[in-house]
Image (cartoon, rainbow, N blue to C red):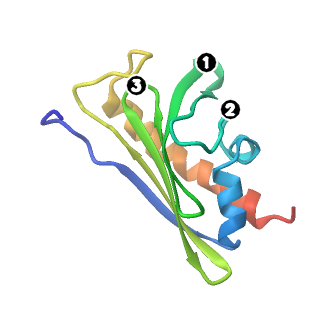
Amino acid sequence: MSQNTLPDIRQTLTLKAPIQKVWNAVATSDGIAAWFMPNNFQPIEGYEFHLNAGPFGDSPCKVTVIDPPNRLSFRWGKDWTLSFELVEKGDQTEFTLIHSGWDADKVTEFGQPHTAVRENMAGGWNGIQKKLAAYVEGSQ
């Protein structure tokens, strides 16, 4: 690990939905596609899949932790790890997103410095989490 590690992006929100519904939204291919990106995810540790990042093409990913219905982690691209942590709060769910692997000395596959991308992503995750909230809190 270099000296220029940047802090994880960590965002928590409370979703007005039971934990199993939130888990289904964050740990199934259809669920992830509904609020994040098209993908061929399967909830199997070690499973390699792709997130379709639109103009950036397909990002290779690999499931590293699967602990239903509380935690899912996967490698995203060459440097990042994305983790979803769920805590049951009665009929609601506390959802924490952790995007780690940031390093000021590194650039993404697309040649963008981590420092710049991290700023964009931190803002972007706010909007993405709003989509997740709308998805799990809406009537399905």
Q: Earlier in the sequence, mark 3 or mark 1?
A: 1
Circle 2 Cα neighbour tier, 10 Å, few/some/many (<14 / 14–19 / ≥20): many
Q: In the visual, does 23 lie left or right of 10?
A: right
Residue in the picture at 26% in, 33% down: 103
Q: Quadrant of residue 22?
A: bottom right
Seen from the viewer's position, the closer of residues 105 and 30 is 30
Q: Give x and y (percent) for residue 32.
A: 68, 44
Amino acid at dot 2? Asn
Q: Amino acid at mark 3?
A: Lys
Q: Is residue 78 above or below residue 36?
A: above
- Residue bearing the label numbered 2: 39
Looking at the image, which residue sits at the far right? 140
Using the numbered discs, state the Cα–Cα distance from disc 1 to disc 2 in whole angstroms.
11 Å
- Locate residue 28, reporting x and y percent: 70, 47
Residue 40, position as x, y percentages in the image: 69, 31
Q: Nearer the viewer, mark 1 or mark 2?
A: 2
Marks 2/3: CA–CA distance: 17 Å
Please report whichever mark, 1 or 2, sits nearer to the chain's N-terminal start: 2
User: Residue 105 in the image: x percent, y percent?
Assistant: 22, 26
Residue sitting at the far left: 3
User: Which residue carries the number 1 mark?
Assistant: 57
Q: What residue lies at 55% left-to-right and 24% top-to-bottom? A: 59
Q: Quadrant of residue 57?
A: top right
| Residue identifier under label 3 | 78
* Contact? badges 2 and 3 (CB < 8 Å): no
Q: Dot 3: few (<14), some (14–19), or many (≥20) neighbours within 10 Å?
A: few
Query: How far apart are labels 3 and 1 at the CA level?
Result: 14 Å
Helix, strand or loop status at disc 1: loop
Disc ID at residue 103: none
The answer to whether 23 appears left or right of 139 in the picture is left
Disc 2 secondary structure class: loop
